[in-house]
Image (cartoon, grey):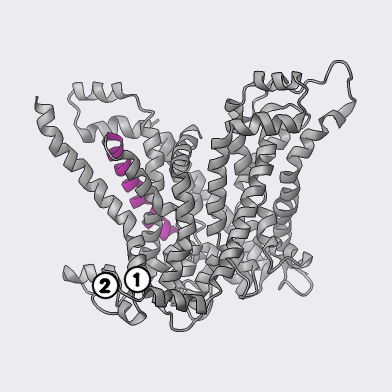
């Protein structure tokens, strides 16, 4: 990796007149980086190790721990609710990510050729991303409300029946995906725009000379050159999308009766992270919760690798 | 020329979708404003109201009765401001060291930093909760501030910035003048990287202001929570939800964010794009 390259010691040479011994002369450097590493030890490294340890134990958070070996992982593999939450998460992720990336790319290409109001558009498109998920999930809950929501009103005006968005398995997923798409499209458009601006203008000039239309130009020039940016966007949206929590939690807490983290009727909006919170803090099953967390981690890593491979291979 | 004749039509074809996109981006904000001016019964009327009503002040009054709005807002501000300050300090210090100095173990420590990037949040939630319970921080804002006080992203970001922005000659010169490490950091490094700090600061503030999962778990006393948690309580636990109040709360909770964004919009959008292309 480029960031780890060795650079010759240039600045912090020991003063030639009074050489100090050993590591002592670097003490101020270690002191300067120590806050981060101390916090990391206490709240990063130790917790990760502890959660691995926990996942091999049965523990309700209060009593004594009981060795469980691999049994919680075995149970995890056969846990229908966990697989259901994986399915929900993936469906929501697909429903959100593909429209989002498509819209972001189209927006970026248009912004790239727009001359006027560029700054204004950028701010407008980025604004959804700075809102708090809680506040905006409340707003979306109202927009998608069955009886008084504006979405159903629009559907009604074109002759389509009401949809109980928050009370049907697909409605829930579409609503969560719509919220995510709304929140992240502009963000990704701006990232694509930055990628587009590194494409040399002569390439487009040459394409036009050769008689290429806008669609040909997009697929032959823009898309291949955007591949690194696409990879970045895809990986980031996989990591964040697969860990979605606040959106379903806030959207569905009014319609779920049994638990804060149930994810709506029939658990159909229960994402992996919601399931993790349910097992841990509703059921007070800290050991199994830890096993679920590691399961989620594996799913996220797996999908990040798959995405990476798919995008990397395409141009070869 | 033909190009000029066609440019107007092209302009419309270009700006019309962009304007529609802008309207879609803005609509939920507009909706929240409209809903916050109606009473609950008006909100449930059909067809939905699209123009402002007259109940805004009443909703605000009811909101302040229903939750301790200013108390929870104060908690959110306290957390967001403290974390932002500490992150800027600790991250820029560490970044300065990693960008401009050599010392034994540097590469190992920096490699570790990159690995920390990858560790997902849920893995440490349970142990963090247990630690906080053991040291008695559960329910207090300390539980939110301390673990967030330095982060790998910020160090990485500031290091990249400092590597290119601070010239070695400048540091050498200040060293010849007898400046020690802290003086170099404060008088040479920090002034040069102010745009980078601004981005990191705004980013951190917004992230903290919006954080939800960890405050929801660790702030066990419903009377002492952050604004996001208070809002979600408003949305759920009051039996029949009064949407006028909830919308007003959601709207007011966005105001500080929008102010911060307005101050730093240029910085955020510009630097975000730069960082993404570089990375």
For label 1, the crowd category at 10 Å Cα-Cα, with few meaning under 14, some 14 to 19 and many 20 or more, is many
Q: Earlier in the sequence, mark 2 or mark 1?
A: 1
Residue A243 in the image: above or below residue A199: below
Indicate whether residue A113 is drawn in magenta: yes
Q: Is residue B101 left or right of residue A283?
A: right
Residues marked 2 and 1 touching at CB (< 8 Å): yes
Indicate whether residue A178 is drawn in magenta: no
Residue B19 in the image: above or below residue B192: below
Among all residues in the image, which is located at the extreme top? A16
Q: Nearer the viewer, residue A141 or A272?
A: A141
Q: Nearer the viewer, residue A6 or B136?
A: B136
The subunit carrying tag 2 is B
- Residue A197 screen position, x and y as percent: 36, 31
Q: Is residue B5 left or right of residue B216?
A: left
Q: Nearer the viewer, residue B80 or B70?
A: B70
Q: For the residue labelled by badge 1, is the local secondary structure a helix, a strand or a loop?
A: helix
Residue at image coords 59%, 56%: B80
Q: For the residue labelled by badge 2, is the local secondary structure a helix, a strand or a loop?
A: loop
Q: Is residue B273 left or right of residue B142?
A: left
For label 2, the crowd category at 10 Å Cα-Cα, with few meaning under 14, some 14 to 19 and many 20 or more, is some
| Helix, strand or loop: magenta stretch | helix
- Residue A303 screen position, x and y as percent: 49, 49
Q: Nearer the viewer, residue A307 or B1?
A: B1
Which residue carries the number 2 mark?
B49
Residue B7 in the image: above or below residue B127: above
Question: What label sits on residue B35 in the rendered view?
Answer: 1
Residue at image coords 35%, 68%: A170
- Residue B93 screen position, x and y as percent: 69, 38
Residue at image coords 67%, 48%: B86
Q: CA distance from mark 2 to mark 1?
A: 8 Å
User: Where are the magenta residues, as a range?
Assistant: A90-114
């Amino acid at each position: 990796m480029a960031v780890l390259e060795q650079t010759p010691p240039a600045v912090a040479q020991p003063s030639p007149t009074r050489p100090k011994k050993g590591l002592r002369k670097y003490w101020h450097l270690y002191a300067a980086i120590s806050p981060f590493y101390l916090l990391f030890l206490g709240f990063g490294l130790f917790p990760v190790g502890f959660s691995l340890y926990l996942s091999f134990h049965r523990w309700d958070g209060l009593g004594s721990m009981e060795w469980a070996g691999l049994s919680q992982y075995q149970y995890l593999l056969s846990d229908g609710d966990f697989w259901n939450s994986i399915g929900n998460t993936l469906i929501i992720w697909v429903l959100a990510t593909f429209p989002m990336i498509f819209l972001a790319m189209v927006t970026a290409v248009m912004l790239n050729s727009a001359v006027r109001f560029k700054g204004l558009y950028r701010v407008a498109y980025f604004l959804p991303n700075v809102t708090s998920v809680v506040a905006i999930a409340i707003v979306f809950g109202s927009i998608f409300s069955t009886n008084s929501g504006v979405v159903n009103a629009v559907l009604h005006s074109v002759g389509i029946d009401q949809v109980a968005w928050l009370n049907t398995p697909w409605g829930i997923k579409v609503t969560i995906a719509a919220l995510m798409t709304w929140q992240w499209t502009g963000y990704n458009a701006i990232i694509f725009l930055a990628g587009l601006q590194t494409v040399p203008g002569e390439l487009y000039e040459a394409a036009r000379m050769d008689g290429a239309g806008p669609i040909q130009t997009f697929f032959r020039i823009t898309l291949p050159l955007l591949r690194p940016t696409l990879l970045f966007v895809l990986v980031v949206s996989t990591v964040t999308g697969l860990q979605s929590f606040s959106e379903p939690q806030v959207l569905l807490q009014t319609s779920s009766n049994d638990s804060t983290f149930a994810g709506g009727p029939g658990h159909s909006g229960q994402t992996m992270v919601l399931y993790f919170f349910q097992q841990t803090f509703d059921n007070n099953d800290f050991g199994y919760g830890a096993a679920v967390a590691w399961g989620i981690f594996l799913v996220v890593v797996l999908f990040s690798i798959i995405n990476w491979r798919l995008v990397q291979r395409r141009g070869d | 020329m033909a190009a000029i004749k066609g440019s107007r039509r092209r302009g419309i074809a270009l700006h019309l979708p962009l304007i529609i996109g802008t309207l879609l981006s803005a609509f939920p904000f507009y909706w929240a404003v409209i809903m916050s001016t109606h009473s609950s019964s008006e909100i449930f009327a059909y067809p939905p109201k699209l123009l402002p009503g007259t109940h805004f002040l009443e909703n605000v009054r009811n909101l302040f009765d229903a939750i301790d709005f200013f108390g929870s807002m104060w908690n959110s501000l306290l957390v967001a401001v403290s974390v932002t300050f500490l992150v800027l300090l600790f991250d820029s210090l560490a970044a300065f060291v990693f960008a401009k100095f050599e010392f034994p173990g540097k590469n190992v420590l920096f490699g570790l930093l990159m690995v920390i990037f990858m560790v997902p949040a849920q893995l440490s939630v349970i142990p963090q909760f247990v630690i906080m319970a053991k040291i008695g921080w559960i329910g207090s804002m300390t539980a939110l501030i301390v673990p967030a006080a330095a982060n790998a992203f910020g160090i990485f970001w500031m290091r990249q910035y400092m590597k290119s922005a601070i010239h070695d000659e400048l540091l050498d010169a200040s060293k010849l003048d007898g400046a020690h490490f802290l003086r170099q950091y404060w008088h040479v490094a920090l002034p040069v990287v102010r745009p980078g700090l601004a981005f990191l600061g705004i980013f951190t503030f917004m992230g903290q202001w919006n954080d939800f999962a960890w405050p929801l778990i660790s702030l066990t006393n419903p009377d002492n929570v952050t604004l996001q948690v208070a809002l979600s309580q408003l949305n759920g636990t009051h039996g029949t939800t009064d949407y006028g109040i909830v919308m007003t709360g959601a709207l007011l909770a966005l105001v500080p964010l929008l102010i911060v964004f307005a101050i730093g919009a240029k910085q955020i959008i510009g630097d975000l794009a730069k960082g993404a292309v570089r990375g």
